């Protein structure tokens, strides 16, 4: 991952596969011991039934956001996957009603509209598809981007037609790391105290 030869998710998948039939097993992330849970029932028990005992996410990105809910100086530290303590518990209670069966069905209508736009794009570019020139990574990225824009922000951006729209460009900048940013990312994991100096490896200032 450090040399960008393999994606982080591929490494995690390999570790998951090596767990075999075990419900959970231990691994090391540098010097940090971790548990990887494989059993769906155990995951459900930890995240739902025993939530009061496992309230916190991992403290990957140290941030002052836990003290000041309006502090957005650290984008990843302020994300759902990094919130901790009372702030995460309050946010979980706020978001849970948004994912009921009826709300999910409403989201499906928005996702279905994006899917139609994606199909229209294929029909318009059928010559490229026949010549095997379709960039599937770009295609899937635009689909994912539009689903997030529609369901989470209520925006109709249609990145298949408006290929340079601001929402897509900012999302791409946020999720595309250079070699230097990858090095900084690894250092954030290995030396978490570096987070406290206020260094950022994202394009936060360009987005907000």
Image (tube, rainbow, N blue to C red):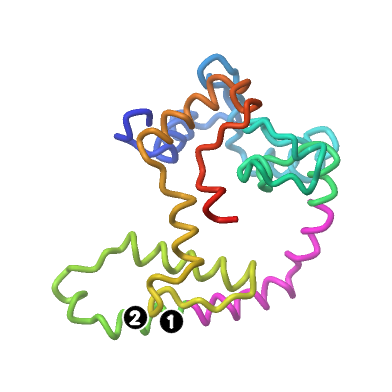
Instruction: State left or right for residue 89 relative to residue 33.
Output: right
- State the image quarter where residue 42 is shown: top right
Instruction: State left or right for residue 177 relative to residue 64.
Output: left
**Residues marked 1 and 2 touching at CB (< 8 Å):** yes
Residue at horizontal 21 percent and vertical 74 percent from the top: 129
Q: Position of residue 4 (x, y in %)?
A: 33, 35
Q: Residues within 10 Å of mark 2 (few under 14, many from 20)?
A: some
As displayed, is residue 22 above or below residue 104?
Answer: above
Q: Residues within 10 Å of mark 1 (few under 14, many from 20)?
A: some
Instruction: State left or right for residue 138 relative to residue 186.
Output: left
Quadrant placement of the N terminus: top left
Residue at horizontal 17 percent and vertical 81 percent from the top: 127
Residue at horizontal 49 percent and vertical 59 percent from the top: 170
Whole-number angstrom distance, CA of label 1 to CA of label 2: 6 Å
- State the image quarter where residue 57 is shown: top right
Quadrant placement of the C terminus: bottom right
The front one of 113 and 185 is 185
Q: Which residue is mark 1?
A: 117
Q: Secondary structure at mark 2?
A: helix
Q: Which residues are magenta?
A: 92-114
Q: Which residue is mark 2?
A: 121
**Is the stretch drawn in magenta largely helix, strand or loop?**
helix
The front one of 49 and 95 is 95
Residue with the most extreme left position: 131
Q: Is residue 95 magenta?
A: yes
Q: Position of residue 139 (x, y in %)?
A: 35, 67
């Amino acid at each position: 991952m450090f040399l960008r030869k393999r994606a982080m998710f591929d490494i995690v998948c390999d570790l998951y596969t090596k767990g075999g039939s075990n419900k959970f097993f231990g691994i090391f992330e540098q010097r940090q011991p971790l548990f990887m849970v494989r059993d769906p029932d155990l995951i459900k028990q930890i995240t739902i039934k025993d939530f009061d005992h496992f309230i916190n996410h991992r403290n990957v990105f140290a941030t002052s956001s836990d003290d000041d809910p309006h502090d957005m100086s650290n984008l990843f530290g302020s994300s759902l996957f990094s919130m901790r303590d009372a702030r995460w518990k309050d946010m979980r209670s706020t978001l849970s009603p948004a994912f009921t069966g009826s709300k999910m069905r409403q989201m499906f209508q928005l996702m279905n509209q994006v899917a139609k736009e994606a199909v229209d794009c294929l029909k318009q570019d059928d010559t490229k598809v026949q010549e095997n020139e379709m960039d599937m990574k770009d295609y899937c990225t635009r689909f994912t981007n539009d689903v997030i824009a529609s369901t989470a922000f209520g925006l109709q951006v249609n990145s298949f037609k408006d290929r340079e729209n601001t929402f897509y460009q900012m999302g791409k900048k946020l999720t595309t790391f250079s070699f230097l940013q990858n090095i900084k990312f690894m250092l954030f994991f290995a030396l978490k105290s570096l987070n406290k100096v206020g260094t950022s490896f994202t394009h936060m200032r360009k987005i907000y």
